Amino acid sequence: MARPEGFWQGLRPLAPPARSPVVRPAGVYIHVPWCKHRCAYCDFYFVVGRPDPRFAQAVVDEWRERRGQLGEAPALVGLYFGGGTPGLLLPEQVHAIISAVGREAALTPGAEVTLEVNPRDVSPASVAAWRAAGVTRVSLGVQSFHDATLKRLGRGHTGADARTAVERLAGAGFRELSIDLIFGADTQGADELDRDLALASSMADHVSVYCLTYEEGTHLTRLRSRGRLAALDSDGEADRYERVQARLTASGFRQYEPSNYARPGHEAVHNRLYWQGRAYLGLGPGAASYLRYPDGTAWRGRNAPDLEGYLAGRAHIVDEEHLDGAHALADRMFAGLRDMERGIALDALEAEHQVRVPGDVEGALEQYAREGLLERAAPRCFRVTARGALLADRIASSVLRD
Ligand code: SF4
């Protein structure tokens, strides 16, 4: 998450920070850095191939070494396997990691254990094994149900594979299913997007919808720069975004984050940790961690994206940063403006970080509220509106820079 420049310079600490145990509840994220191939739009850190058999033990070792960072007897609301393609892990590896974490941390009642998977990795045997291993929720990387668009995106599956995967997951009793979709491919017309949304909303209670982005060095970006595909312009993206909002809202979903929609009670527990500034420990090469303390300070860092070093027991942290109360408050506000339900409650944030929000920052929030891009959930509590959702990060940057 980019932290805006300049915000904290105007903040006044109310008390000097002191070290203390991490604020609860917390989560654990496990980064699984393998994929079968590289999708045409992807610039993530991963290695092409199958997971190394040493990976699960390396994660368990890292957990044992670092679990103390979450405090004594940590209580976890979520365990999230992201990637990469975590569905490529052998079920025994998934089980070994869940068991090791569960032995040394209390998974709170209803804790969510999510596995990101791709449709081609969903076999009758794998769904049964994931259930037995303790996975409670699957996030399925569908992206589109249409083969021409899947081909354009360089995905390794078809629309039929995606439908079969959903049937298998439902058949195995996975009630918590999230479907990921992408909009904005040049092959995808508005009608096709409507059909994707209708299918996804009929199959799952949680849908994440992302706009296709053209990242440096990707295949799609090369095609675009050679004039071999016509990307949507920003007005086109905004039109599609509003279409997504309208279709999913009409199907009974609530937009609770700019890219995330759920039927009530099916919101992602782990992802909410990010927007609500909760602590999470990231395990695996390239995984990010964020720890927040009751004194209002925080720490964040990222494991080196060095797979061989990690497997050889040389995991180490890069980009480490200790945040005083003012910096931690700025981060909370930036992330919190993506939380479309709770938003940012300034009284609570000031108390938690022992820092006052400057008057001009609050004034900027009030101005966006007058323009209808933010609304007040309560006095001094602001959240983005449906109209402001697409601009949430821009609003946060502008407010915190002023
Ligand atoms: S499956 Fe996901 S992480 Fe892997 S290449 Fe495709 S988009 Fe990237």
Image (cartoon, rainbow, N blue to C red):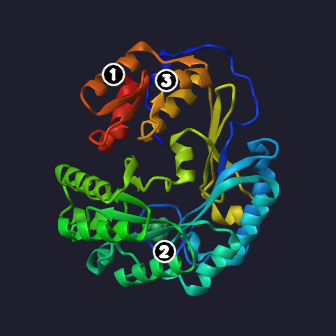
Q: Where residue 192 sits: x, y (%)?
A: 22, 71
Residue drawn at (67%, 66%), measured in percent from left and top?
308
Foreground pick, 152 / 205: 205
Q: What's the distance in space between the residues labelled 2 and 3, CA to CA? A: 40 Å
The numbered mark, 2 or 1, whose residue comes first in the sequence reads 2
- Report the disc number at residue 346: 3
Q: Is residue 227 visible?
A: no
**Image height of 256 relative to 144, above or below:** above
Q: Could one spot residue 254 in this view of the protein?
A: yes
Q: Label 1 sits on what residue type?
A: Glu
Most foreground residue, 325 or 115: 115
Mark number, residue 366: 1
Q: Amino acid at mark 2?
A: Asn
Q: Is residue 128 above or below residue 60?
A: below
N-terminal of the pair, mark 3 or mark 1, is 3
Tag 2's secondary structure?
loop
Label 2 beta carbon within 8 A of ligand 1: yes
Label 3, residues with CA under 10 Å away: few <14, some 14-19, many ≥20: some
Q: Left or right: 275 with respect to 365?
A: right
Q: Quadrant of residue 222?
A: bottom left
Q: Secondary structure under badge 3?
A: helix
> Callout 2: few (<14), some (14-19), or many (20+) C-alpha neighbours within 10 Å?
many
Q: Which numbered disc, 2 or 3, marks the residue closer to the eye?
A: 3
Query: Of the numbered discs in the image, which one, if any, rests on residue 24?
Result: none
What residue is disc 2 on?
118
User: What's the distance in space between the residues labelled 3 and 1, CA to CA?
Assistant: 12 Å
Expressed as whole percent of the image width and height from the top left, the position of residue 398 reads 34, 29
Distance between the Cα atoms at labels 2 and 1? 43 Å
Going 37% across and 26% down the picture, which residue do you hit? Answer: 399
| Mark nearer the N terminus (2 vs 3) | 2
